[in-house]
Image: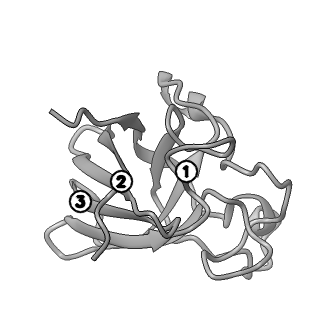
Amino acid sequence: MASPTLKAVAIISGDPNVKGSLLFIQYPNGATHVKGKIAGLSPGLHGFHVHAFGDTTNGCMSTGPHYNPWKKDHGAPTDEERHAGDLGNIYAGHDGVAEVSLKNSQIPLSGPNSIVGRAVVVHADPDDLGRGGHELSKATGNAGGRVGCGVIGLQSSV
């Protein structure tokens, strides 16, 4: 496997028991691997997105909309028509812990569309991936409230 070019971290907090950490590793091929654990979630699927702002002055609400530099409709991570920040769903087991491991080529840690300084957000409900027919499906995936978030920051190589 190629050696990582950049690493970033996000410490997740939010609703009283939601806590976790995520590691972002950007490889030379352009894909960024997101891995880590988030605990304190209700069992089941939770929408998982990169939001536009790394501002948590008003909790997760001040992170703004999904990161969407190309002004597209909401979709699944594999769709051509999707926000760059649309990462689909994560699954929390009966113990409320979600083990996150995904790769995505639209969330680089460098360059003009870098996600460093933005926030990653975990939602209360499943993301319908833009296919739910709800008025919010094409904007947010109708994923409900924001139960946890963290600012994405570069990790020291020391």
Residue that label 3 marks: 36
Type of amino acid at the residue the image marks with label 3: Gly
Residue drawn where x is 83% and y is 55% of the image: 70
Where residue 33 sits in the image (x, y, percent)? 38, 65
How many marks on residues? Answer: 3
Residue drawn where x is 49% and y is 68% of the image: 31
Residue 112 appears in the picture as rendered: yes
Colouring rule applied to residues: one colour
Label 1 – label 3 distance at C-alpha: 15 Å
10 Å neighbourhood of mark 3: few (<14), some, or many (≥20)?
Answer: some
Label 2 – label 3 distance at C-alpha: 9 Å
Residue 131 picture quarter: bottom right
Comparing 156 with 148, the one in front is 156
Type of amino acid at the residue the image marks with label 2: Phe
Q: Which of marks 2 and 1 is nearer the N terminus?
A: 2
For the residues carrying marks 2 and 3, which lies nearer the camera in this image?
A: 2
10 Å neighbourhood of mark 2: few (<14), some, or many (≥20)?
Answer: many
Where residue 17 sits in the image (x, y, percent)? 21, 44
49 with respect to 8 (left or right): right
Residue drawn where x is 42% and y is 38% of the image: 152
Q: Which mark is residue 24?
A: 2
**Label 2 secondary element:** strand
Residue drawn where x is 24% and y is 47% of the image: 21
Residue that label 1 marks: 50
Label 2 – label 1 distance at C-alpha: 12 Å
Comparing 5 with 118, the one in front is 5
